[in-house]
Image: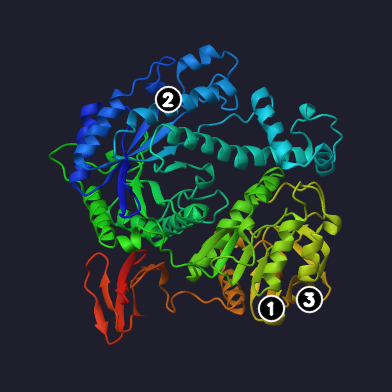
Amino acid sequence: MNPIPLSNRFTLGAGLEAHLPLAELKRQMQLLQKSGFNLVELPVHWSEGEPLEGKYQFSRFEELARHAASLGLGLALDVRLDAAPAWLFEKFPGLPPSPAPCFDHPQVQALSLGFIRALAGALAAYECVAAWNFAPAGECSSPACEHTLAAFRAWLEQKYPGLEALNAAWRTHYAEWRLIRPEGQAGEVDWRIFLAEDRPRALARSRAEAVHAAGPAGWPVSARSRALEAAAFHPWDDASPLHSPAPEREATLLAETAALTLAFDRLRCRSSAAAEAPLWAAGLQGGPLQDALHPGRALTREDLRRWMLTAAAAGAEGITFASAQGLLPASANETAPRLEEAARIGAALSRFPELFAAPTWGGAEVGILVNPEAAQACASVPPAGEHLAYSTRGWHRLLWELGIPADFVDIAQVGAKMTPPYKALILPFPLSISEANAEKLGAFVYTGGALISEAPPGRLDEHGFFNPGELSPIFGNLFGVRQASFMPVREPADPPRWQPAGRGWGEFSEPAELEGAGPLDGVSLPAGVFVQTYECQGSQPVLKHLSRAAGAFRVGVRGMAWLLGTCVGHGATAYRAPQTLAFVRRLLELCKVQPAHPGRLLLRVRSAAGVQARFFFNPTASALTEPVEVGSAQAEDLLGQPLERSGSQVMLKVPPYDVRALVIRTA
């Protein structure tokens, strides 16, 4: 029995609510199917499916599967193991008193996998079951838990070739593996890597194996990652609409589009290792956020259109809404404008499955480097983890505003055969990095790439210990510098957002504007968080702070190495200044990177054989009309709006803070 394939159609779906009566769920499924939706997501709670140990109750899920099949709807199962049954805690009284048990407990893990196998076996006969997803299960993170600690020690034995190697890395003196605890700087870093990176992968793998052991081998299985659940806005942001006393419509719309692009770009790039799997923009908001006394804004058709086209522009091959209730009318007598609009956009995307139901992202010339292990090292030194996340997001925002598409690139993927062959890689807030990764980035430069690094490059090693000279030795050679000074810089406004309380006089440099020099002469960069100055040794100063080099440039055989002695990404959303954008524009021009579109509209592209989709975003408060070169190709608006054509160009008008998409047939 083969499941419904997801790779040859654009997926449009919505989530069901577990607590609703069966009749209401069936009604919602019928309304969705009638409107053109082809998928529903069904939450499956462990406590509901196995209320007593070994006594499975799957009749409700099977009935909904039969109903979905009768409507021709695909069914995606959202399995929630954190909603564990009460008998589990009675069986193991030592478990923490929480709905989410410790899955490092061998018997708890075995029972959870047994539930998954039983559920998969019960639903294996239903071809409508199209995908499985495992929600984050709130796994145990207590170093006092003997089961989690045992799993951690087993992981360490795989990571290090022997106890002597671990002691050398951790600077400890453990005599036996069984005595190890996540203590000290290096121990905390490894503990964080284990909890955030390796254990979730191991759990996801075991759950997928349980699904496939009882069901079709072709069932797609995914695990939602908390790494993609970062808030769209941060308290450090300047004029963030979610933190402003009186949010403005324009600021909200602009920030929403940028944040959605960030989220879907991250999702696309995290999924690059599984290129065969469909990429869904899941959990999209379909109605106003609700709580008892503070309902969210009434969403419009325009909101949904902007959000859905933004997801499609970033490479989504499917869109699912978090809840069908937000889209559907409350009664049969009411209209459903959000449902109608979502269905209209979905139908338009479904007309071109070769473009939107396949991995057709048009690619990027710039990559923003992501280093998961370094992120955990930074998280062990608060607030460095926040600075890393904030700067990473800020670089994405700067590139978005410049109209330059970007990928997030895991540092493990950096090598001579990278696809695509990026012109430039950006390294945000590289406080911690291993020498092995620094060497890989050096090879990228020597073979023709441009590396742009913020400061402080490798102040700490991968275990969180200071490097000699407070600088990665390999980076010191790559950038041709030695550190002269490192000092936090005061923020330009009061009260400060991220500046810590001082311990005495002389700890902070005054707010500063770093002046461009050499190839960056004529532009400047506001200093953010700190300023690092250098003694140049074979490199050229490109930024100056009080007449000292605060940035360096060096040619590496075929490529370029740029070191900027401050945090640049922070200036994308906090203390926004036109100088920051102008500086980054000049820097990328020197790296031979240009915006995807020459006008003020921002362009994202998806391409397939003989056809191309171009998404144009207007980030301004006024309507923009600009020419788009299409040659002799046939061009049409994705949503059927009229186009004005003049020779080889189409005149495209995009309303303020809106998006339009052109489909161009090139063959």
Q: CA distance from mark 3 to mark 2?
A: 60 Å
Question: Do we see residue 287 in this rendering?
Answer: no
- 108 or 636, nearer to the observer: 108
Name the residue tied to disc 2: 46
**Would you place residue 647 above or below residue 426 in this image?**
below
Name the residue tied to disc 3: 539
At a point 26% along the width and 70% down the height, the residue shown is 637
Q: In the picture provided, is 514 more to the left or to the right than 294?
A: right
Disc assigned to residue 558 = 1
| Label located before the other in sequence (3 or 1) | 3
Q: CA distance from mark 3 to mark 1?
A: 15 Å
- 618 or 107, nearer to the observer: 107
Q: Position of residue 557 (x, y in %)?
A: 73, 78
What is the secondary structure assignment of the residue under circle 1? loop
**Would you place residue 23 above or below residue 446 in this image?**
above
Q: In the picture provided, is 293 more to the left or to the right than 460?
A: left
